[in-house]
Amino acid sequence: MWATVTRIRAGGALQRVGTAARLGAMPSARAFAAPPQDPSSEAATVEAPLGMTAEEAAAKLSDSRPKTKKGLLLEKQRVRAHLRRLLPQFEATGSRRTKALNPPTMLDHTSSNLALETMMAAGMHLGHSASLWNPMNLPYIFGEREGVHIINLEHTMAALRRAAHFVKQEEPPAAGC
């Protein structure tokens, strides 16, 4: 397919630049302002993209800078519509996030065998600084080492088992809630 490249001077004079052998030979598919060919001339030239006359390209370039909020909104809508036409294959890509939580399946994947060794390895025995302690936590404190309270893991394991039993006994909420 052959295409003719036409430039229009800011004064309105048309100038035929040449003919491109293929569509892919064109450097751009948009109208853009090029630097003036003559350094003494103040007028810039506009290249007409394929499928558009030089007059349309000049009108599009002059209208391409919206000056009002309505013009900005129209330009934004035009760009979105253009992108939707260009990238239809990406609409079905990805996955949808669901906001629904499925507690029964989450409980099936939890480990029910909790051991003191795994709790120690996880660092559950380390508490807060001894100077910032709350006296209500005294039954759960095993001791103190280097200014840090050590948590009693036997009390912690019993509390975790009670919490797990309570969660398993609860009914899942109805779908309408």
Image (cartoon, rainbow, N blue to C red):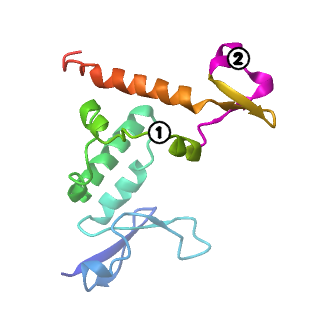
Q: Secondary structure at mark 2?
A: loop
Q: Amino acid at mark 2?
A: Asn
Residue 64 x %, y %: 41, 50
* Quadrant of the rendered image containing residue 153: top right
Return the residue found at the far bottom.
Answer: 21
On the question of residue 32 being in view, the answer is yes
On residue 59, the disc is none
**Residue 172 percent location from the top left of the image:** 24, 22
Q: Secondary structure at mark 1?
A: loop
Type of residue at label 1?
Answer: Lys
Instruction: Look at the numbered discs 2 and 1 and tell me whether their residues touch, using CB distance below 8 Å.
Output: no
Label 1 packing within 10 angstroms: few (<14), some (14-19), many (20+) = few
Inspect this view and state whether residue 14 appears: no
> Position of 167 compared to 154: left or right?
left
User: Which region shows up in magenta?
Assistant: 123-139
Q: Residues within 10 Å of mark 2 (few under 14, many from 20)?
A: few
Q: Is residue 58 magenta?
A: no
Judge by depth and name the residue closer to the eye, 140 or 42. Answer: 140
- Residue 139 vs residue 98, the one in the foreground: 139
Residue drawn at point x = 37 percent, y = 44 percent: 75
| Residue 163 location (% of width, % of height) | 41, 23
Residue 2 in which image quadrant: bottom left
Q: Nearer the viewer, residue 152 or 164?
A: 152
Tell me, for residue 134, which label it has, or none.
2
Q: Quadrant of the N terminus?
A: bottom left
Q: Which residue is mark 1?
A: 67
